[in-house]
Amino acid sequence: MKILIAYDGSEHADNAIESLVNAGFPKSVDALVMSVADVFLPPPIKEEDMFPPHPPEGVRRAHEHAQHKLCETEEMAKRASQKIRQMFPAWQVSHKATANSPAWELIRVADEWKPDIIVMGARGHSVLGGRLILGSVSQRVLYEAGCSVRIERGARKSSDSIVRLLIGVDQSKDSLAAVYAVLSRYWPRGTQVRLLAVVDTVMAIGTEPGKPSNVKWIEVDDENNWDQVRELFEPSAETLRVLGLDATVMIRRGNPADEIIDEAETWGADCVFVGARGARGIERLLFGSVSAAVSARANCSVEVVRVPRRG
């Protein structure tokens, strides 16, 4: 598994690192810690190519400032990678520091390195002249990254220390990928999982996800028909149970983002798993704006799952 960890030295970034122990990641991981200084790093000064031969003092200071920020960012990324090595001795951990626009640099490196998931803190700060995670940056990464993105908000453990995972489900491919993301991790005994389906007045049931030609419509405005919806997701819950997880299917009616956030808050979920995109058309349960809203407003960690571009 390849994990790209965005780090800016903020408290939220430190919490994101601490929370890695609760993400169920395997022992075999190739992790890259990346810090971005939000400064422009001009090309090296070549005095022989300049006229007059000596660059202006302002140009020299700009070069020195940018290089100083990059060196500080490099040291920051190095410290974070050392901390992760101590936490996970079996992981292969490296670090990288660059100077660029943070969001686009993260996306660029992710496109080149092709991680399975990007992990970042919920918020950051303008440290070292370079914010890394600050609202619009994290949202841009969520929209543009070609892999899953995990927004960490620190450990939110209940008094009984039981891990609680909430999965927003529909019949989309990304929703199935969210279920598989939970299935593929390593969770402590007693972990509880709730598969939450948010319904409208009607819902399409298909034999295979992503094939709208093979669907039938059921009326779900009446709660007496919700058993049909529950049966649709029961196989996923049973697979989770086979792996030792305490899994149940829940159904709610309303706005998907609001219902997912409310359930996570009421239940005390440690993490919400949602697909990046949901089923299209009137039967959609989880669409792009829903995953963005959940990641921005939930009080717990959120993992937005994508089907990898490489298949």
Image (cartoon, grey):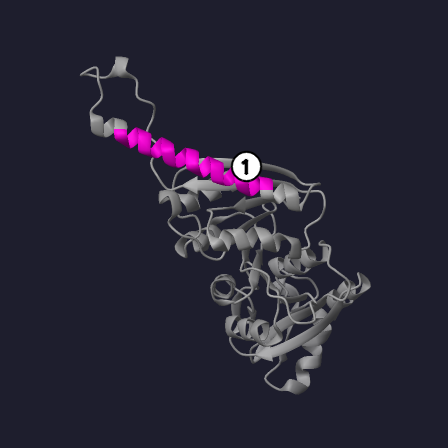
Residue 118 image point, x, y percent: 55, 48
Q: Please name the residue shown 54% across and 55% down the image.
A: 15
Where is 111 relative to 281, above or below? above
Q: Is residue 42 left or right of residue 286?
A: left
Q: Please name the residue shown 79% across and 66% down the image.
A: 241
Does the stretch in magenta take in 87?
A: no
Q: Quadrant of the C terminus?
A: top right
Residue 73 image point, x, y percent: 44, 38
Q: In which quadrant of the rendered view does residue 275 lie?
A: bottom right
Callout 1 secondary element: strand
Where is 307 relative to 220, above or below? above
Q: In which quadrant of the rendered view does residue 82 lie?
A: top right
Residue 274 image point, x, y percent: 58, 62
Q: Is residue 282 left or right of residue 247?
A: left
Q: Which residues are magenta?
A: 61-82
Where is 202 relative to 278, above or below? below
Mark 1 is on which residue type? Answer: His
Viewer-closest of 70 and 109: 70
Q: Quadrant of the N terminus?
A: top right
Viewer can see residue 111 = no
Q: Residue furthest top?
A: 48
Viewer can see residue 227 = yes
Q: Please name the residue shown 70% across and 65% down the image.
A: 207
Category of crowding for the residue at label 1, using alpha-carbon neighbours closer than 10 angstroms: few (below 14), some (14–19), many (at least 20): many
Viewer-closest of 11 and 284: 11
Residue 245 image point, x, y percent: 76, 65
Does the stretch in magenta take in 80?
A: yes
Viewer-closest of 60 and 228: 60
Q: Is residue 144 left or right of residue 163?
A: left
Where is 58 relative to 241, above or below? above
Q: Please name the residue shown 65% across and 46% down the image.
A: 87
Q: Which residue is mark 1?
A: 95
